[in-house]
Image (spheres, helix red, strand yellow):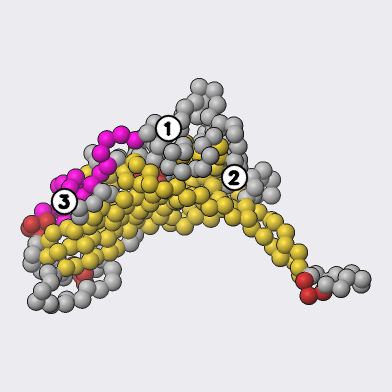
Amino acid sequence: MVYDGSAKKVAEFIAEDSFGSLPADPDFVNFGGYVNTTSIKKTMVPVKIPYLKDDDDTNRLQSTKTQKVSEAFAATVTMNPTDWSVLPYILCAADASTYAIGDNIFDIGMGVIVGSDYELLSGGCLNKYECTIASESLAEVTLEGMFASSTGISDTDYVTGAGTHASAPSGDAIKFGDLSDILYDAATTTANGIFIDSVKFGIEYTTNPVKDAGSENESGTAAWNYGQRNISLELNMTLDDLTVAPDILDGSGHTFAFTAGGKTMTFSNIVWEGDWDEELNPDDVIAMPLSATNVDIAIA
C-alpha cells in the first residue's frame, strides 16, 4: 500500500503526568484546529574520531571513525485554528484551561499514526507559537516543540487502557473576518485613522535541554530549561490619516486588542521598533508596517 491521501495520518498530543510519563489512560487531544502538516525531525548526533591506524593498515587517508553519542527530536505543526486551546501550553499557564501567563512548563507527549504504524514522542515541550491573521484569509498557526525521546515506528498503539485518541476538529476555522472590537490605545481604528490589513503575533522561548548521565532517554535529556519568554506583534496598516505616525518614534508603551475565537487578546507595553519610510506615490495608499518584541499579552 502506498501512503497516499487515503492512508490514515494522525497527529495529536497530551500533557504528561511527569517528564516522559503518560497518564495511565491517556486521552489525547487535537491541536485546536485543522492540521495542514506535521513534520518530525529526528537527528542522530555523531562525533568523528580521527585516529592512528595500526602498522599493517595501508588505508591511512581514511582513518576516521564516526560514533553516535546522542539523538534529538523536534516537531513542527501547521494548522488553521478553530480555537485557542493550545495557547495555555505555550503560555505556561497554571493548567490547560487557564489563559493567564505563568511559569508552569508543561511536559507533553505527541502521538503520530501513519496507516497501521504508531510513534510516540515523549518528554516534550512546546516552545514556539506563531499566528498570522491576514485579510481575506484563514488564521494560520505554526507550532514547534522539542522532545527527549521517541518510541520509533511500531505496530503497537500507544493508547492503553481506557485511553482515547483525539477527536477531529469541528466548526469553522478562525478567519480575518472574525476579528472584532479592534482597539489601538483603547480607541477604535477609525479614531486612529487606520485600517488593519493583517495581525501576526508570536510566543517563543529559548529552550535548552538539561542533560543527565542517568537519563534513559536516547537524547540524554532529563528536563527543559526555558529562557526568557518573547511575545512579538506585527501589524500591517493602511492609513486614513497620520494619527499613529508619531508612535514609531515616541518610545512609549502602546496597546492593541482584538476579539476572535471567543477570546479577547490585549497586547500592552508595545514599543514599536525599527523605522517607517514615508513613501509618497501617486498610485499607492499610505501604509505602515509596525513590529515590536517583548510585549505583554492578556487573554480573557
Q: Amino acid at mark 3?
A: Ile
| Vertical position of residue 165 compared to residue 270: above or below | above
Question: Which residue is pictured at 27% across the width and 60% down the height?
Answer: 234
Q: What crowding class fits label 1: few (fewer than 14 Cα within 10 Å), some (14-19), or many (20 or more)? A: some
| Cβ atoms at labels 3 and 2 below 8 Å apart | no
SS label for mark 3: strand
Q: Which mark is residue 182?
A: 3
Residue type (three-letter) at the residue carrying disc 2:
Ser
Q: Is residue 231 visible?
A: yes
CA–CA distance between discs 1 and 3? 33 Å
Q: Earlier in the sequence, mark 1 or mark 2?
A: 2
What is the magenta range?
Answer: 169-188
Label 2 Cα neighbours within 10 Å, binned few <14 / some 14-19 / many ≥20: many
Reading the image, the residue beneath label 1 is: 166
- Judging depth in this view, the residue of 24 and 73 nearest the camera is 73
Q: Residue at x 34, y 35 (%)?
A: 169
| View extreme (right): residue | 56
Which label is found at residue 149? 2
- On the image, the x and y values in percent for residue 217 come to 64, 45
